[in-house]
Structures are given as structure tokens and as C-alpha cells.
Amino acid sequence: MTIRIAYLYYDLLNLNGENGNIKILKQQLEKQNITVQLDLLTTTDEINATKYDLFYLGGGTENHLRIALNHLRQYQKAIYQAIEDHKFFLVTGNALELFGKSGINFFQFEETEADGGFHEVTLETDFIGKEIVGLLNQKKDIVATKHPFFKNSQQGVHYINFFAPKTFGPIFAKNPLFLEYFIKQLILFKEPLFTFKPLEFEFEEMAYYNYQKLMRKNLIK
Amino acid sequence: MKKILILILTKILAFLFFKLKKSSDLPGIIALKLDPNIISYFRMPQNTIFVSGTNIKSAVANNISQIYQNEAYNVGENAYSSNHSLGILTCLIKNSNILGKIKPSILILKVDALALEDTLTKLTPNYLIVTNLSREQSMITGHFEETFSKIKNNLKETTHLILNADDPLVSRLSLHHKGDVTYFGIENNFDNKNISLNYDDNLDFLYCPICDTKLIYEKRFYNNIGHYYCVKNHYTRPKPKYPVSIVNEEMFYINNHTIHIDEPFLYHVYNLAVTYTLLKTQAILSDDKINHQIDQLKEITVAKYQYQNKKLFFPPTKTTNPVSYYHILEYISKQNEPITLVIGYQKLSNEYIENDVSWLWDVKFELINNNDIKNIICLEKYAYDIAVRLKYANFNTDRITIVKNPNQLMKNFDEYTSNNVYFLTCDSLTQKFKKEGKVIA
């Protein structure tokens, strides 16, 4: 079995170590004896949206988002179709803005300027048993979304297989339950009767608990 | 009158800290509280040099200061206060008379990205050096475009820019500056390996600043540093005034002068190149004196210690800064000997309290994944985050050991480590381990 990943605008949208999500996914898929075809696509490439199982976009500077958007607009229809066809999208950091009103306008969320601070968060979702931990860069708030990623927060989007938590950094590195959920959904979508080898997340689980402990200490301070 | 009294009070304080050899911004803090406009009171000397950039600004500022002091010039610098706004103000207090005149004929200020906007708005240097701009943990300074904007929006025409030609993030400052610009950079590197681009290579800036077309690289030294041009001819790497040719790992030429170095770190070559370029541009010293002084400069090298029967190595890394790690990991990858790596941080930064270590994923640990690395000790409170990073750099997890307490490591040092131990640790941990060992000359 082969999973085809398109890392869109890898040379523009790659801040805050977010390429780590690709490294983590690739290794975990290969441990399941799955062949991973990773295509690095950018403004000089065509995007054949039907070819891929997963699209990844990371966060970037405002200038780089603008350059990426100029290219992405050409593929607006194809991207819309891919989302509705249940293709997987993992969109981290501020890359979500590309899909809103200021972008290709798939999602109807509003973006408003916020306090610009960084906030450690621990938030629940509907699809994972434990909270997701991470860091939100609150330069822009995303409001009035119909498909929030988190319960009790309007940050981020989750729609069919479009996952955009809006936290920045490699979200899979300290959220092993989300990693496990994502891998399984991705594989089972392609091969519903797939038999999984055991997934091992010893370090990731300890990193998760440790982060929560350190966050609580900061709150007390 | 009020400003005079403020200066008298804070100068006494600055003098006390200087005598105690303690670094402190307290004089600046007090002065600013008493008068928010105090900085406008100071009159700069004829030669004011600001040094900014993500890496090597302290080394460059220290080099320039050392050279002028060696040539008996009176130099003011923020060596005893920080490179933030209050530290800079403290430096001005320390180096001025009570009428606000800066006494040294040469003032050298290291300016942190956080202080750039404030400092450049209120003070105008004769020379502004920008060493490089690259990513760091975003909580500190925002990302590199924000730092670029702070410089760009506050440049004065009378400031002479000294810019890194090999860094398109920096060199494009010239597009926004009407004053003089001089460039430094590397023309030839002996190994010409022309590193190919991969998605995890800290691709900070690869597009033409004028037309958004992707730049073509004829040479790449690391990340987006090298020789680049736009295919539509809108932008090309500028020419350094005194280009560097690196002959081998121990020697390079600049302007027909040969410079010998002990360790093959590119950042050190850039350090000397920018120092040389600034001195030549200022034209205060003769060529002979510049060449002589450059040759006397001490390199910031890998500190070597002995502990029990093992060698300890402390490479000069900067926590949360992937570029500094790149150079060190390249160095480690070339050491053909069994190595234990110790990686750990008690504190990530003085600038923020959050516990995010995303920057670790911009550090290319894959460079050292070879058989020489016998094991890696992941230390202190972020040990598991480090272990996760290494796992996905394809290190066998059998080679990774978690040790939460540094004292435990020292107690069982022989058991945990091979003969050569490299420390990639924060300052406090580095100092702790150095105290245990003896310097190897």
C-alpha cells in the first residue's frame, strides 16, 4: 500500500519546526509497512489534487502566505473538490488563513486581529479521548466557524478529513493520541480492512504529560 | 537639571555594578522610570556602531571593541549590560558625562531584535551591521520578517549599512535604504559541496524580494545562505567589497590577507569577514594594523575539558537557535571517534516562560545520525521532547537515555558515557558540567 503526501509550499510554509509533522507521519506509516511517496510542491509546480491522499501545509510569514495564496488560487476548485471528496488535509499554524475569506474562501470564518501573544493551551476535541496540548499564536482570531476543531473554542477547523488545529509547531510530537487517530483514519480510509502493527509512543506520551505538568506550573506562577 | 541629577544617580549605580563585575540593566530601568525621554539627552560620538542579527552579533561586537582597545582607542560597549533597550540605556549612562556626552570616541552597541525598533527610532548609528537573519523560537522576537521590518522601517539615510551579501533576507535591506551599503560574504568555499535543498533545511527566504519568483542558487553554503539570483534579473546577490576565499579548513583569504583559523566553523569566517569589512570601511586604522589585529583575535572554539578519564567538549551553541546548531552538528559529524551526546535545557530563554520546543524540529539532528554516536543522554525537564525529536531523526531508541537530574549523570558518568562527551546544553547546565572538569589547553 502507498500513501501519497503532498507537502504544499514546503519552501514557504515551514516555520516553527512544523516539518516535524511530516517526519513523524512518514516514520509511523513506514513502520506499518506502508510506502510513503512524499512530493514537495511549491509555486513552480502543478497540483494534481486527485493524485494525493494527504495534503500538508505549515505556518509561514505573512509575505510567504501571500505568495502561496497567489499560486493556490489557481487550484481553488480542485482543492474544494479534494476536501469534499474526503481527502486528508493537515493544516498547522496560520496556514488555515489560506482557506478562509482572505484565502480561497472554502470556510466562512472571520479573521480578526488579536493580542498577538502566545498562549499554551490544552483543549478538548470531539474525536480524541484526551485533550490536545500546544501553543497558539494569537495574532489573529478565527471566529464564527461552523466546524471548530476544539470543543469550547472557535480556534481551528475540523471538517470531514480537514484538520487545522491552528496550534503551531509539530503537533504530533506531543499529542500521541491525535497522531494515532490521524494515522488510523488516513490508512483505514484507503484500506478499511488494514491490520495495524502495534503503535509505540513511549517518549511521546511522556512528553505529553510533562508538557501538561509544566503548563500547570506556569499557570500557578 | 533633572536629567543631570538622574544621570548622577544612575552613573553611581552603573559604576558599582561595573566594579562588582556584574551585568545589570538596573541603572537604565531607574533612569527610564524617572524620565521616559532620557535617551534623547545623550550625544553620540563620531563613531557609533550598532551590531544586530540573529547570530554572532556578540562575537562581532566584541571583536571590533577588542581591536580598537588594542590600538588604544577609548571604546564604549554594552558588555556589562544586556543588548535590550534598558541595557543599551545603561551602557549610555555608564559611558557619558553628566551632560549626556558619550565620552569614548567609539561606541559599539549590540542590539537585540527586541530592542531594534526602540533603539533605531531614538538613536542613529554611523554604522549598522546586520550579520544574518534566521528563525529562532518565535516567542522571543517573532519571526525574521518582523525583525527585518523593524530595521527597514527605522533606517536613516546617514547610517552606513554593513550587510551579509550571502543572506537574501539581509541583503535586500539595501532596496529600502538611500544611504551607503557595504557587503561582506564568501566568494569561494574549498569543498564547494553545494548543499542540495531539502524540506527540513530551514528554508527561511528563497524568493525574489521584488517579483516573488523563486531564486536560483549557484552556490549554497547552508540553509538559504549562498549565491543566488532571480531568473527575471530583478535581484542578484550583491558583491562583497572584500570577498572571502576559503582555502581549506584552516585558512582563508580576504583582500590578499591570509587568515588562519583553528576550527572550521563557517560562522567564524563570517565573524572575521564582517569585522574586517567594518574596519576597512571606517578607515580609522591602517591596513597593516587591521591585518595584525585580525590575526590576534581569539576564536570562540569548542571548549575542551577533562573529567575522570574522559574528554568533555562544549561547542558554542545558542539555545532555541537552529543555525548555531547546524554548524556544531556539522562539526560533530566529522569527528571520527565514539561520542556520547548530552542534550538538555533547564531553561529555554529569559524572554519567555512557555515550554514549547518547536525549534528543536528546525535543528537537523539527522546530520549526526551515524555509528560514531554511541548514545545520547536527554537531560532535565525537556528530556522527553528531545527524545521524541531524536526518534524521528531516525536514531535507534536503544541509543537514547533519559536522565532527569544532572547530578545523577555526574554520579554515574563512567557508566553513561563513552570517552568523548559533547554537551549541547543551556548555559546553566554547561557551567555546571564545566565546573566538574579541568580545562584541556
Image (cartoon, grey):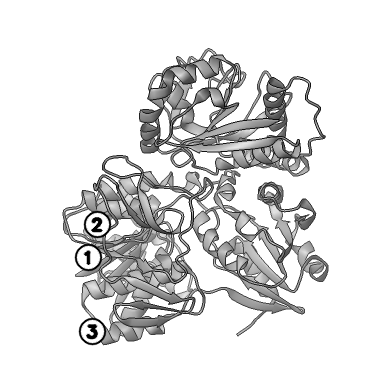
Q: Residue at x 51, y 35 (%)?
A: A58
Q: Earlier in the sequence, mark 1 or mark 3?
A: 1
What's the residue type where badge 2 is placed? Leu
Q: Is residue B27 left or right of residue B173?
A: right
Name the residue beneath numbered marker 3.
B286
**How far apart are the two marked residues, 1 and 3, measured between alpha carbons?**
24 Å
Q: Quadrant of residue B411?
A: bottom right
From what the image shows, is residue A8 above or below residue B85?
above
What's the residue type where badge 1 is placed? Met
User: B80 and B281: which one is in front?
Assistant: B281
Residue A170's spot in the image, x, y percent?
Answer: 59, 39
Give the SS element for disc 2. loop
User: B428 and B159: which one is in front?
Assistant: B159
* Tag 1–tag 2 contact (CB < 8 Å): yes
Give the SS element for disc 1. loop
Quarter of the image with the C terminus of chain B in it: bottom right
Name the residue beneath numbered marker 2.
B123
Dot label at residue B171: none
Rate crowding at label 1 as few (under 14), some (14 to 19) or many (20 or more) other CA atoms within 10 Å: many
**How far apart are the two marked residues, 2 and 3, measured between alpha carbons?**
29 Å
Q: Can residue B34 be seen from the camera position used here?
A: no
In the displayed image of the protein, which residue is found farthest to the top? A146
